[in-house]
Amino acid sequence: MKKLLLIIALVSVSLVNAQAYKGKGDTKFQVGANLQENATGLNVSYDFGVGENISLGISSTYALGVKSELDADFGDRFDIRARFNANLGNVINIDENFDLYPGLSFGLKNFGGHLGARYFFTDGFGIYTELNAPFAKYDTGTLTPAEKLHNQFTVSLGATFNL
């Protein structure tokens, strides 16, 4: 019985051997909810490791639950961004399954920054959250309520996958 429990424990530990960021060549896909004032939406992102602690990627958000009084068309609801991440999981060394990644993004609406965190439960599946904020809006005039979509502080959370 003790041998059976030992084997089960060893197999369980080997199945949980996930790593949040592996460095150059690592690929991540994330899908989740995007929460912001006056809208909720869908966020998807893809990141590709180009160095030990650097990844580049693309992220897109589409606002679904927009209040009707905003009169937001497709262009107001949609945003796509190129992104740069500094993956610090192995630097802060909390857990090999955890990655903290501050970054910058260049999108259709603004130049901004994000702070994200991911935790992997298995080698292929985990959860993530990101806090996003614009640093410079491309429209320097007064934004309409519809133009404020994706031009404000947002929070994204959902599932992340190793590809």
Image (tube, rainbow, N blue to C red):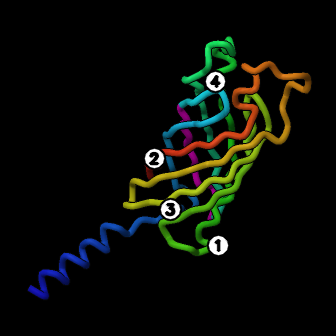
Pick the front one: 102 or 82: 102
Disc 2 residue type (three-letter):
Ala
Quarter of the figure with residue 80: top right
Q: Which callout, 4 or 2, points at the residue further toward the start of the chain?
A: 4
Give the residue pinned by disc 2.
159
The residue pinned by badge 3 equals 20
Image quarter of the N terminus: bottom left
Residue farthest along the left direction in this orientation: 1
Q: Which residue appears at 59% of the width and 71% of the height?
A: 90
Inter-mark Cα distance, 4 to 1: 34 Å
Position of 135 with respect to 97 (left or right) is: right
Residue in view at x 56 percent, y 74 percent: 94
Q: Residue furthest right?
A: 141
Q: Residue 78 carries which label?
A: 4
Give the Cα distance between marks 3 and 2.
13 Å
Q: Which residue lies furthest to the bottom in this view?
A: 2
Left or right of residue 17: residue 76:
right
Q: Which of marks 1 and 2 is nearer the N terminus?
A: 1
- Residue type at tag 1: Val
Left or right: 92, with 113 as reference point:
left
Measure how far apart labels 4 and 2 are at the Cα level.
21 Å
Range of residues picked out in magenta? 42-52
Disc 4 + disc 1, Cβ < 8 Å: no
The image quadrant of residue 139 is top right
Q: In this view, does 80 lie above or below 94?
A: above
Q: Give the number of the disc on residue 91.
A: 1
Q: Identify the residue shown where x is 71% and y is 52%.
A: 103
User: Mark 4 belongs to which amino acid?
Assistant: Phe
